Image (cartoon, rainbow, N blue to C red):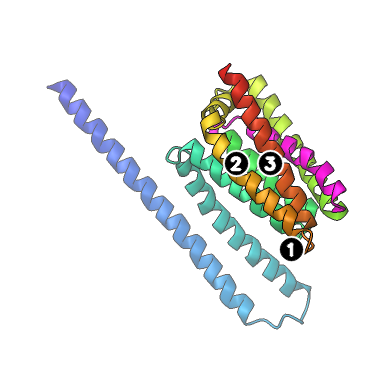
């Protein structure tokens, strides 16, 4: 009887503490939102050409707003680590890195593009994804460089060389972290390769891409398709290498 009473008191205490914590969180975020709104009204009524104090106020408001957004984004990211499957995180990381590489040479500089690779490295670390998934694109892009140079795509080759360096930097750093901390990866590189690189899966893609490559080479005689021609040839070579690997694995 006494034990049951203690158990009830413990459960009641936990409920009270949880409610107080929730109330304190609501109060904190309400106060934070009120401060941001008041600062917004304050800044909207100021003439921006007055003095340095105005610039300081605007900067403080922007920083406060960024902190507010990043705080909620971080909370959502922490919850998603336990809900999102690592394979989905890997696919999202590849989509993000492709978008970052596309925008890095058009909207912002290549130096700023490295921040995207840091974000991807953090995702790999949090979801315990094998770092060789970052080294593989570096090897593939490195093999792409000679084909670009043969096709006289020197500017694109220079940009790709920078991205190869970025991939290698984050990939090697993650390799060192995995070795030191002895991390057990949730998405293993070797099992992924064995699953997706098989003769039955690669051969149809190799056949279709070979026909496409021949078509591009024919059209290149009438239209300027140098980049597409050498890119399709390189993809065909990569698929052929994958097919040979699959054949050797079966033997």
Q: Is there a contact, CB below 8 Å, between mark 3 and mark 1? A: no
- Residue beneath the point at 69% across and 49% down: 213
**Mark before the other along the chain sequence, 2 or 1:** 1
Q: Nearer the viewer, residue 134 or 197?
A: 197
Dot 3: element: helix
Across and down, in percent, residue 126 comes to: 56, 35
Q: Quadrant of residue 204?
A: top right
Across and down, in percent, residue 27 comes to: 42, 57
* Residue 42 visible to an observer of this rendering: yes
**Mark before the other along the chain sequence, 2 or 3:** 2
Residue, disc 3: 236
Residue found farthest to the left: 1
Q: Is residue 210 above or below residue 136?
A: below
Query: In screen coordinates, is 133 left or right of 111?
Result: left
The span from disc 2 to disc 3 (Cα, nearest Å) is 9 Å
Magenta highlight range? 127-153
Residue, disc 1: 107
Query: In screen coordinates, is 196 left or right of 27?
Result: right
Residue, disc 2: 207
Kindly identify which numbered label has been placed on residue 123. none
Dot 1: element: loop
């Amino acid at each position: 009887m006494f034990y049951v009473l203690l158990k009830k008191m413990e459960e009641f205490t936990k409920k009270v503490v949880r409610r107080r914590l929730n109330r304190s969180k609501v109060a904190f975020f309400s106060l934070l939102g009120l401060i941001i709104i008041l600062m917004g009204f304050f800044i909207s009524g100021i003439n921006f050409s007055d003095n340095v104090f105005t610039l300081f106020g605007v900067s403080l408001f922007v920083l406060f707003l960024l902190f507010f957004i990043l705080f909620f984004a971080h909370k959502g990211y922490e919850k998603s680590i336990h809900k999102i499957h690592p394979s989905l995180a890997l696919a999202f990381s590849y989509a993000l890195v492709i978008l970052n590489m596309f925008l890095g040479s058009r909207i912002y500089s290549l130096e700023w593009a490295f921040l995207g690779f840091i974000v991807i490295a953090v995702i790999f670390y949090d979801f315990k994804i094998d770092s060789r998934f970052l080294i593989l694109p570096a090897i593939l892009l490195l093999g792409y460089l000679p084909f670009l140079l043969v096709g006289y795509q020197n500017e694109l080759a220079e940009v790709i060389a920078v991205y190869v360096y970025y991939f290698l930097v984050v990939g090697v750093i993650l390799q060192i972290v995995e070795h030191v901390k002895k991390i057990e990866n949730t998405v293993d590189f070797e099992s992924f390769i064995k699953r997706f690189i098989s003769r039955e899966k690669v051969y149809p893609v190799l056949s279709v891409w070979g026909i496409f490559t021949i078509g591009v080479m024919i059209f290149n005689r009438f239209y300027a398709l140098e980049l597409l021609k050498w890119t399709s040839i390189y993809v065909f070579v990569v698929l052929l290498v994958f097919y040979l690997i699959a054949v050797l694995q079966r033997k």
